[in-house]
Image (cartoon, rainbow, N blue to C red):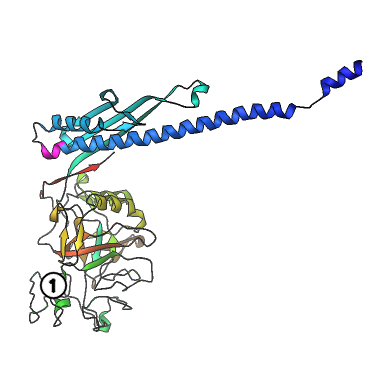
Amino acid sequence: MLPKARNRFLDEKGSALVLTAVVMVGLLAMASLAVDIGMAITARSEAQRVADSCALAGASGFIDADEVAAAAEASDRAYEYALKNVVRNVGVDSSQVTLQILADSAKVRCWISARGLPTWFATFLGIDGLDVQAMAAAEASDAGRTDRCVLPMAIADIWGDADDDWDIPDRIPNGEEFWEYEPEEGDTYDIFDGVNCNEPSCAYNGTGFGSNYRNSKEGWNELYAADFGRRLWIKGGAPGRAGQGSGGDAGGQDVMTLPGNFKLWAMPDISQTCEIRTGGSWVETNILTCNECPITVGTDYLTEPGNTVSIKDAMDQLYNEDPLAEWNTDTNTLQSIYGEDSPRVRYVPLWDPVEGVREEQIDGRATGRFIVQFNNFAKIFIENAPTPPEMAIYARFMGIISGEPGPDTGSLIKYLRLVE
């Protein structure tokens, strides 16, 4: 009898079922928690959307209301838009909204808190509710101010190239043409003297951007007169595409002195008595803001190492400040709700391709940077944001500006943007 009882205790039949049941409980608990975490992430995204709309609506009060009533209007609008929204199908109420109105900077911060959101499976683990919070800040910023919004990108002025293909008579790179300034081959450069003349019989007034040199052949003077509206490759695509723009585009990438190609340059900093400041973050800052220091011709500036990829985020933000703006190729005009005060209308300095750039040296050693001087300034419209894989940036030439960019106050038109 004893051996038989002993065998019954040692019998392992059914143990796998017990282990499976225990493991299944754990797996179900993890799965249930994953479902509720997914719901929490969705709720957080919805709360962020509410916070964004709340902040933007509030900041709009600083555009439409006068200075005295702006703060109150901003608060009313922020609450109004926030309370129209839902988080996880539950309407937002005023107790879930926290505002900070910064009248001096025309900024509104909005916090959205959704507490006690119901859970499904996590209740079995003793978690009866989830809390999520989101914050956004928006401001009504000055738009335009194009009289001092100089980009930290300098482009080579255009020239008369002796090898230009007159089968496409616009005197800029096309098709398989490969441009490099070569005076020994007969290339010529004359800075535009500021006097436009749209008649074919007029002198070309220089070969640089803004002249009629490229419109002086009969039948072509009406297209892009004085280069206005001409598309530039501010930054070309992948290497090996020099001169492949169509329809009179200027640009390319193989040789950096091609007309239209940019060089990043170090801009001065008003907080440092307009001394030159370097660094990639400073380049990005000057893409998104208006540098208030005077930028002058004949002054030595340093180039910055870098490429389009390193400034992509800043260029994307600049583009998105007026995303609906476009160049109408039928009328050769800019279409934007801000007109020429669009944030995408900026200035770029031009440098003389004859003088080019010279290597910076300290104690006889190269620093890896170059020195460049400017001889003119052009107004451009940024036509696109750079997109992978080629990261090309295009712009439209809008004329040579008179004088030099400086800290004069420009347009007071405002636009809304999320800043936090």
Q: Residue at x 16, y 62 (%)?
A: 377
In the foreground, 103 or 263: 103
Q: Quadrant of residue 358?
A: bottom left
- One can see residue 136 in this view: yes
Q: Position of residue 2 (x, y in %)?
A: 91, 15
Q: Main secondary structure of the magenta part?
A: helix
Q: Quadrant of the C terminus?
A: top left
| Element class at badge 1 | helix
**Where does the image place residue 180, in percent across and percent down from the top left?**
30, 75
Residue drawn at 16 percent across, 58 percent down: 335
Locate residue 18 relative to residue 414 in the image: left or right. right
Asked whether 151 or 52 is in front, the reply is 52
- Does the stretch in magenta take in 209? no
Which residue was labeled with disc 1?
225
Q: Residues within 10 Å of mark 1 (few under 14, many from 20)?
A: many
Q: Which residues are magenta?
A: 61-65
Quarter of the rendering containing residue 261: bottom left
